[in-house]
Image (cartoon, rainbow, N blue to C red):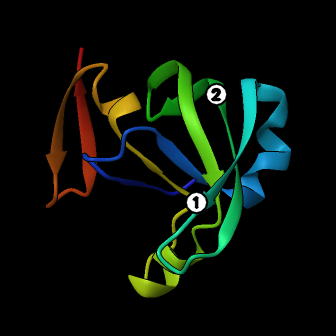
Amino acid sequence: MNLAVDTCEESNLLDENLYVNLKAQLSNEKTYYLIGADKVSKRVITGELKELHVGSNKFKDLMTVFNDITHFNSGYSLNVDGIIGYEVLSKNIVVISYDRKELIFIN
């Protein structure tokens, strides 16, 4: 997967199209209806992703939201499957190298 980083994102956000393939890896799954700025109600699924590998690092029990992220990709000319946030970044000291386009986790 291609993942973006958002240091203010409380939980991880993955595109809703990934839900079917990752459903077996979720626990505490819940469905919510959120109303956005456009006043349209949208169904989102949340749950704890049992395991996520980022490079050689393994993270467990990560709160994850599944929602449509096509507006990120089209609005910012990105090609990402999701966004990692606090749930991953808070587990270690993390250095963001913009030149090398990588995250460096210091354990």
Q: Could you tell me which secondary element the residue under label 1 belongs to?
A: loop
Q: Could you tell me which secondary element the residue under label 2 belongs to?
A: strand
Q: Mark 1: which amino acid?
A: Asp
Q: Specify whether 106 is left or right of 72.
A: left
Asked where in the image residue 107 lies, by quadrant, the reply is top left
Residue that appears at 74% across and 52% down: 18
Q: Which residue is mark 1?
A: 81
Residue 78's place in the image compared with 94, above or below, is: below
Residue that appears at 30% across and 32% down: 89
Residue 49's place in the image compared with 42, above or below, is: above
Q: Specify whether 49 is left or right of 28.
A: left
- Specify which label sits upstream in the sequence, 2 or 1: 2
Q: Position of residue 33 (x, y in %)?
A: 69, 53
Asked where in the image residue 95 lies, by quadrant, the reply is top left
Q: Nearer the viewer, residue 32 or 12?
A: 32
Q: Mark 2: which amino acid?
A: Leu
Residue that appears at 43% across and 85% down: 75
Q: Nearer the viewer, residue 5 or 28?
A: 28
Q: Nearer the viewer, residue 52 or 14?
A: 14
* Front label number (2 vs 1): 2
Q: Which residue is mark 2?
A: 49
Q: Position of residue 41 (x, y in %)?
A: 68, 67
Q: Position of residue 58 (x, y in %)?
A: 49, 21
